[in-house]
Image: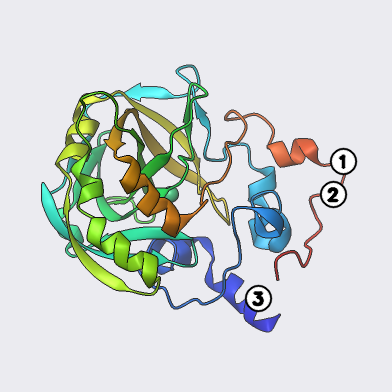
Amino acid sequence: MFIFEKCLALFTFFTLVLSGPIFGNDTSSAALPYGYAGSTGPNVWHKMSAEWKECATSKQQSPINIHARTTVAVRDSQLLYPAVAMFEVFYEAYALRVQLVPSDPQEFAAMLGGRRYRLVQFHFQLPGEHTLEDEYFPVEIHFVHESVDVPGQLAVVGIFGDFLKGTGAPDPIFSSLKNQLEVLRRRKDARLHASVDLKGVIRNIETSTIRYYNGSLPFPPCSEGILWYISEEPVRLRNEEFQDLKKITKLNSRHTQNDLGSPNLLAMACPGAGCLDEVSSVGR
Ligand SMILES: [Zn+2]
């Protein structure tokens, strides 16, 4: 119990955002306080800690179904990344995902909504967490950025990954990681390096319609104020590349939340006053 409480204290919002295991590169936490299914899944996150209540009460929760009527089309978004760059690649056990951290973050700028950001890391969600006009995708890549001007302000660029279609070409971001994914599949604690080809995702953000909304962290503590930029156009991957990713990450997506500003779905499902206040021993 004490160790669990101590872990929760460590995962306060700013620790988590700036230096913790979720958005940083510290994989020292052996504990796995939350999951994506069953008794540690998204339906009970709010019961696992008093600090995670927002998961069941906030009305700006992510991910959402992206509608033209509830999000804003933005122009001039740019990922000012090198076309090919070195990343540290590892399995982030705490968050159940393959994570890539740039060797030199100073080289990775992004212009989003007229503001300048730096890339902190990117990772894969399977299946895609957002849906687009009710359509879901097998993969969603999240490029997590922090504002250069406003410390702690996060902006996440989401690009869907969908299966190769017709004579189209697969995006090289996936083939860049083939060898590393094979190693991670055998040894989840491996820390590897990869030269990642980013040309396809850079072009995607320049040419696709980008939908913006102000949402939340899609995992505990579910804090609001995260800026989301979701590309309408998916990048393509081969079935084998999807299988390699899937074998490692397994299911690691939160289900879509209610429309922005509408009641939290868990609050709607709660049978009466006070039922969200209970903090249970679920998952401990
Ligand atoms: Zn993510």
Residue at 40% x, 41% y: name it: 139
Q: Quadrant of residue 20?
A: bottom left
Q: Label 1 CB, ligand 1: below 8 Å?
A: no
Quickly name the residue at label 1.
271
Report if residue 279 is visible in the image: yes
Q: Residue at x 48, y 25 (%)?
A: 135
Label 2 secondary element: loop
In depth, the one of 169 and 76 nearer the eye is 169
Q: How many numbered circles does the render carry?
A: 3
Residue with the most extreme top position: 69
Label 1 sits on a secondary structure element that is loop
Q: Mark 3 and mark 1 in contact (Cβ < 8 Å)?
A: no
Q: CA distance from mark 3 to mark 2?
A: 22 Å
Answer yes or no: disc 3 within 8 Å of ligand 1.
no
Mark 1: amino acid: Pro
Q: Residue furthest right?
A: 272
Whether residue 153 appears in this view of the structure is no
Is the residue at mark 2 in contact range of ligand 1, meaning its CB lies under 8 Å from it?
no
Graded by Cα atoms within 10 Å as few (under 14), some (14 to 19) or many (20 or more), the crowding at tag 2 reads: few
**Separation (CA) of disc 1 from disc 2:** 7 Å
Circle on res. 275: 2
Residue 2, position as x, y percentages in the image: 68, 82
Q: Quadrant of residue 59?
A: top right
Figure quadrant of the N terminus: bottom right
Residue drawn at (40%, 23%) of the image: 72
Picture layout, residue 204 above or below residue 196? above
Instruction: Give the residue type at disc 3.
Output: Glu
How has the structure been colored for display? rainbow
The secondary structure type at the circle numbered 3 is: helix
Q: With 90 as the anchor, is 106 left or right in this view?
A: left
- Observer-nearest of 13 and 41: 41
Residue kind at label 2, given as amino acid type: Cys
